[in-house]
Amino acid sequence: MWCPGCGVGVMLGALLRSFEELGYERKDTVVVTGIGCTGKADDYLLTHALHTTHGRALAYATGIKAFNPKLHVVVLMGDGDSVTIGGNHFIHAARRNMDLTAIIINNFNFGMTGGQFSGTTPGGAFTQTSVYGNPERGFDISALAEVAGANYVARATPYHVWEMKTNIKEALSKTGFSVVEVYSPCPTNFGRHNDMKTATDMLHWLKEKGLPVEAYNRLRGSEREGFFAVGKLVDRDEPDFNTRYEEIRATAMAKKG
Amino acid sequence: MNKREKGCVAVAREMELMQGNQAIAEGAFYAGARFYAGYPITPSSEIAEECSKRMPLLGGIYMQMEDEIASMAAIIGASLSGAKAFTATSGPGFSLMQENMGLAVMGEVPCVVIDVQRRGPSTGLSTKPAQGDIMQLRWGRHGDQIVIALCPATVRECFMLTVAAFNLSEKFRVPVIISPDEIVGHMRETFRVPEPGEIEVIERKKPTGPPEKYKPFTADKDGVAPLAAYGSDYIFHVSSSMHGPDGYSNNNPANAAWRVEQLHRKIDMHRDEIVMTKTFATEDADVLLVAFGGTTGASRAAALELRKKGVKAGVLQLITLWPFADREVALLGSRAKTVVVTEMNYSGQVAGEVQKVLGSGADIRKVNSYNGQIITPQEILKAIG
């Protein structure tokens, strides 16, 4: 179970509703998790599941999907798994355009270990290992996914829960690498050190600063300060790894004669 | 061309001048491996190259991953999708694979890892042989765990032990490591790939019975549970965390004890089937040379030389490095007056194990090389004096 006010459970609810609405069968679905608060999610699922090592969930999922392309493979990670310890796997899964759906709970800190700064903690933010302010900058996960080659990228929040479900369904339905980044409240370890003392304060932050993509795009330069786009950010149809591999196989077979 | 000459041509066509690394790839294909994920590294790259050419034709998948961490993860994922899967690397990459190999131990996922040993430490001498990873093969992963490690000495053994590695891995749901050194990986010998059916190929035990009752970690009498594949009706859960028979998290101390014991017990139970050795003129040996991999040939040459001089010398070749051949060493070692362990490392990693078996009173001599050069028969003879 997760702390009161956490966003992981909201994401999991949206994911399960998406499975149901898309008619996914338990036997055709594999959920792969990493380590951390989000990594606990598989214990609540009845699908095929693989709970992996920290940061490597995408690499495991790559093997699962490459060998059996018929499976729906969903990868649940936190910001630690996806872009801190596992950053290399993230950019390469996107480059390879593996037909995986990565759902990333970004709560801007390492929650499970007590709230240290991660690869997405904003510069200056306070955590248990940045009590004087974070000297590092944080990654923009969605932007990283876009430049690395993901076919689908969306940003969601537990405040915009129905939109989140829409994005998850779109991501699941898309062939190729899809990413749903979920900005998630962590009142226990992040909010209370950063002027958002309660879970409600954090939801207010998501509500007030999260703008629909169109509204966000209308803002110019410094007007964007503190705001972020919510919704579908990237939607393209480059061939995925398995499709390309079958093309290569056909070439090999033709050469063999 | 007469009949006999025609026959020779037919045989010659089947015989091939083959490299050790290539024979490993051939052995994997023969055993049914249809998934390879790896990151190129000297002196193992020929295995990757061979897989990249052959896997598409065999209906398999070759994946070149971003690093060895991902390679290990990908073969475990593919194995859970039902593949016989493997990877190949050398020291630096082997170090990176350890954490995820631990998941294969914990989750009892069959997979084969090739570690073509090169001289370290660190980047070391990438093109030169060594046998410095012997303890890492056994203890490289954190926690309390056990794996199987095999070590070929010839091109033929590269093939045969790769088939054996897949068989053991499938049968016991455990990672199996094959650890040739650079000499063996790059050695060329004539070899004929056996016809299908000539050598036994074992498949993992699949679950039977009602799918809703399937528990992926409830072992049968042989100590091993059946393993389903993702996508089958037998829906299952695999976890790196401590888990119960159903694969779901379980922090109960009794459960943890059961789990750790079970991972060890399945190997201990089948020790005699797993531990393989070869002997050469050991029946009456006063001098017992203990060798493995790239030191085997020189040890046999030294033993022959000693026999010519009237010294009764023989060779015990360790084929399975882990679990250690303690009974075999004890049997032959206690009969011999002198035991000589030849290995390409400074610390005498196998000599230490031999000492453990024979006790501190035994006359154990170590012949070690750690300069990236092969051990010669002359060096062995010098140690015996």
Image: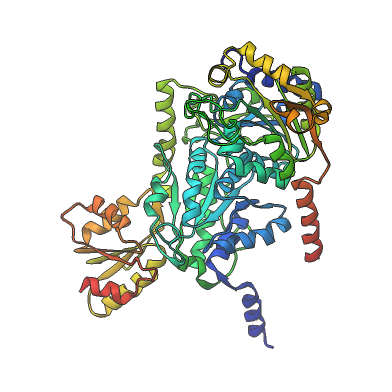
> In the image, what residue occupies the spot 34% across and 70% down?
B299
> In the image, what residue occupies the spot 61% across and 37% down?
A83
Residue farthest toward the left in the current orientation of the protein: B361
The one of B184 and A40 positioned closer to us in this rendering = A40
**Is the residue B299 above or below the residue A133 in the image?**
below
> In the image, what residue occupies the spot 40% across and 37% down?
B143
Q: How many numbered discs sit on the rendered protein? A: 0
Q: Position of residue A5 (x, y in %)?
A: 61, 14
Q: What colouring method underlies this structural image?
A: rainbow
Q: Position of residue A114 (x, y in %)?
A: 48, 23
- Answer with the quarter of the image where residue A52 lies: top right
Q: Is residue B328 left or right of residue B124?
A: left
The one of A10 and A73 positioned closer to us in this rendering = A10
**Is the residue B288 above or below the residue B76 in the image?**
below
Please say whether residue B304 is visible from this viewpoint. Answer: no
The one of B129 and B84 positioned closer to us in this rendering = B129
Please say whether residue B215 is visible from this viewpoint. Answer: yes
Q: Quadrant of the N terminus of chain A?
A: top right
Q: Position of residue B316 (x, y in %)?
A: 33, 62
> In the image, what residue occupies the spot 25% across and 51% down?
B357
**Is the residue A232 above or below the residue B188 in the image?**
above
Q: Is residue A161 left or right of residue B368?
A: right
Residue farthest toward the bottom in the current orientation of the protein: B1
Q: Position of residue A155 (x, y in %)?
A: 73, 28
Q: Quadrant of the C terminus of chain A?
A: bottom right
